[in-house]
Amino acid sequence: MALEQTWRWFGPKDPITLKEIRQTGATGVVTALHHVPRGEVWSVEEIQKRKGKIEAEGLTWSVAESIPIHEDIKKRSGNHRLYIDRYKESLRNLGKCGVDINCYNFMPVLDWSRTNLQVVFEDGSITTDFNTVAFAAFDIFILRRHNAEKDYDEGRYSRAKQHYEGLTAVEKEKLLQTVLLGFPGSGEAFTLKGLRSALGEYDVLREADLRENLYSFLREVIPVAEESGVLMALHPDDPPWPLLGLPRIVGNKEDIEQILNVVDSSANGITLCTGSLGAGIQNDLVDMAGSFARRINFIHLRNVRRNSDGDFIETNHLDGDVDMYGVLRHLLIEQKRREHEGRKDRRMPFRPDHGHLMIPDQHRQGIYPGYSLFGRMRGLAELRGLEMGISQSLGSS
Ligand code: DNO
């Protein structure tokens, strides 16, 4: 047995087709009903429709990524009761349709954040990076967040100022659009005004509150996920530290330990995202893969080169600061264990998470940053080879 190879597809609007995905060798598709607004129920009809499209191409719908969490749930305010009920309903519907893993995140306001989505890598391919000085420049001088300067030490403040003053108008605009982009596929890009007001709503919410709100959500939703036969897979924060004054609470080993302990059930699991967690200098991904193996419900494999200031760049899958060999070894040992026990969750789907934009994709319109065909296919192929080597060396015992 091998880990299930999957591929993220943004639905019919994705320029990469299911036929192409099939030829990458992936067998599972990871997708979401991006056209259903956040907070609405995913109906059985809509899920079946999407599932039918995928299966018509000889693939399976392996993971839902993501049923997005409404901000009211994260803040536990406004209509949170209604949205939690709807979330449960969507999970029940997923379960009825046999889609049994849901990847989700609990990052307030923003999803993943980068400062440059078009970094030319050493080999001419295009990748993304996060530069803490550029991000501070955005925060203090472009967003002009109230009291933002208090979040940075003097050195970083003056470097951010210098950085900002050195930017042309076009570069400022580019930085602004990059941070506002939100998550591709979701169609949820912010305006500057919208971002300010969304941040304003979090003014009084402290880190401890956000944690408590996540825990309450889990206490309510995990039993429903269990009944419905759906495994929840919490995605870590990317990057794994607070941004724009917003708390982030899924960034390191202790955070994850606490979350898993809130409801001790295999339905309360994580997405091991080696890239998101890998950006944190304190995170040892091999240790985390080993320690959390039993509760890993979904896997995102990618790599970063990082430094202790918090800057990082997305590198190719096998080159970077994450020891992919060590991570995969733990995952394969865990899969053997699940097989031995005849567990239902032995598929252990992974996807090559992000890939560089390589030459054959560079003229193609509409490819979301990180979600190229060739770059991800390179990643998948490399990971597949590495996996086979590790499996053979582990033997059949
Ligand atoms: C980035 C993605 C994340 C992820 C969500 C899950 O490329 O891995 O945006 O899909 O955080 O909810």
Image (cartoon, rainbow, N blue to C red):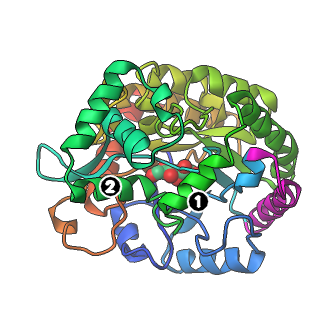
Q: Amino acid at mark 1?
A: Ser
- Compared to 300, does 26 lie above or below? below
- Dot 2 lies on which element? helix
> Which mark is drawn over residue 62?
1
Please tell me whether the stretch drawn in magenta is mainly helix, strand or loop: helix
Q: Position of residue 4 (x, y in %)?
A: 51, 51
Q: Residues within 10 Å of mark 1 (few under 14, many from 20)?
A: many
Q: Report whether 260 appears left or right of 199.
A: right
Q: Residues within 10 Å of mark 2 (few under 14, many from 20)?
A: many
Q: Position of residue 79 (x, y in %)?
A: 84, 58
Q: Position of residue 85 (x, y in %)?
A: 87, 59
**Is residue 42 in sight in this rendering?**
yes
Q: Amino acid at mark 2?
A: Arg
- Compared to 314, does 358 lie above or below? below
> Residue, x 17% and y 53% (percent of image)?
125
Q: Does the beta carbon at disc 2 come under 8 Å from ligand 1? A: no
Residue depth check, mark 2 versus mark 1: number of the one nearer the observer: 2
Residue interval drawn in magenta: 75-97
Work out how far the residue at label 2 is from the one at label 1, CA to CA, in angstroms: 18 Å
Q: Please name whichever residue, 211 or 29, is drawn nearer the observer in this view of the structure.
A: 211
Q: Report whether 367 appears left or right of 30.
A: left
Residue at numbered disc 2? 376
Q: Please name whichever residue, 314 or 318, is drawn nearer the observer in this view of the structure.
A: 314
> Residue, x 46% and y 37% (percent of image)?
239
Q: Does the beta carbon at disc 1 come under 8 Å from ligand 1? A: no
Q: Please name whichever residue, 280 or 350, is drawn nearer the observer in this view of the structure.
A: 280
> Residue, x 45% and y 18% (percent of image)?
282
> Residue, x 67% and y 43% (percent of image)?
202
The magenta stretch spans residue 88? yes
